[in-house]
Amino acid sequence: MIYAGTSGFSYPGWKGKFYPATLSGSRMLAYYAERLNGVELNGSFYRTPPENALSNWAATTPPGFRFCMKAARGLTYSAEGFDRVGLAGIFSKRLAPLGEHLGPILLQFPPARQLNLGLLDSLLAALARPAAAEFRHESWFCEQTYRVIRAHRGALVVTDEEKWPRAPVMDLGPVAYFRLRRGYTTASLRPWIEEVRSAAAAHEDVHVYFKHDPEAPGLAQRLVKAVRPQPPR
């Protein structure tokens, strides 16, 4: 299954471009979910959404829709001595109201956080559900890291962003995860369509999220249409 969308959905600046100009904010998610089947939410990096909000999101979206929540910043940005593992368990449990709508948790490691296999292993274990790990320091791209992710049936995030190193596309578990953070022309999107098509052949689920620009929803729709086989006429 290919899940594609954008980083967030509640953007007033998208009115008149993706959303109808008169659409109310309370209708944005329903409108979005009629056209795309996944969203990556960054607000949970700073604060876990309240239970009633998560329940409402689940009720507003169709069964095949997925929310990929960014893990709380304390898991990877905090100083030594902070109970990261305890927070990981709490964070994961707080997302339970999403039920089957919950996709992989996005676990981001900052550029200053170098290879720490013990931390990675303990966080993935405490989350106790599929997670996609994004690394911004090259020391993480090694076989030991891949072995830990594979043991937890996680994913290595492939991020297309100029200022961060790009992870290799690897088959480490049932899920593949792409974050496409630039503006794309038809020509520059084509290689990513091929990457996603290859990943779809080797994984159960593939998640692809574009940066929150007004053009992003259209890019996600184009990618899905290009990757999914077209029915014979």
Image: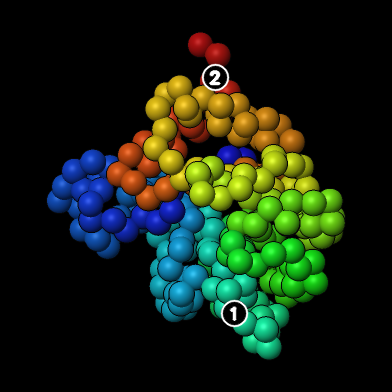
What is the x, y in percent for residue 62?
47, 52
Mark 1 crowd level (few <14, some 14–19, many ≥20, 10 Å Cα): few
Image point (51%, 25%), residue name: 190
| Residue 30 in the image: above or below residue 113 | above
Q: Earlier in the sequence, mark 1 or mark 2?
A: 1
Return the mark for residue 141. Answer: none
Mark 2 crowd level (few <14, some 14–19, many ≥20, 10 Å Cα): few
| Residue bearing mark 2 | 231
Q: Is residue 139 left or right of residue 8?
A: right
Q: Is residue 175 left or right of residue 74?
A: right
- The residue at the far top in this view is 233
What is the x, y in percent for residue 26?
27, 62
Q: Count how many numbered circles sit on residues in the image.
A: 2
Image point (84%, 56%), residue name: 144
| Residue 13 in the image: above or below residue 183 | below
Q: Label 2's element? A: loop
The type of residue carrying mark 2 is: Pro
Image point (33%, 39%), residue name: 215
| Residue bearing mark 1 | 78
* Residue 222 figure quarter: top left
Residue 83 versus residue 231: which sits nearer the camera? 83
Residue 145 versus residue 99: which sits nearer the camera? 145
Q: Mark 1 or mark 2: which is in front?
A: 1
Q: Label 1's element? A: loop
Q: Is residue 77 left or right of residue 19?
A: right
Q: Are marks 1 and 2 in contact (CB under 8 Å)?
A: no
Q: CA distance from mark 1 to mark 2?
A: 49 Å
What is the x, y in percent for residue 92?
62, 74
* Residue 24 figure quarter: bottom left
What is the x, y in percent for residue 105?
60, 62
The type of residue carrying mark 1 is: Ser
Residue 78: tell me if it is visible.
Answer: yes
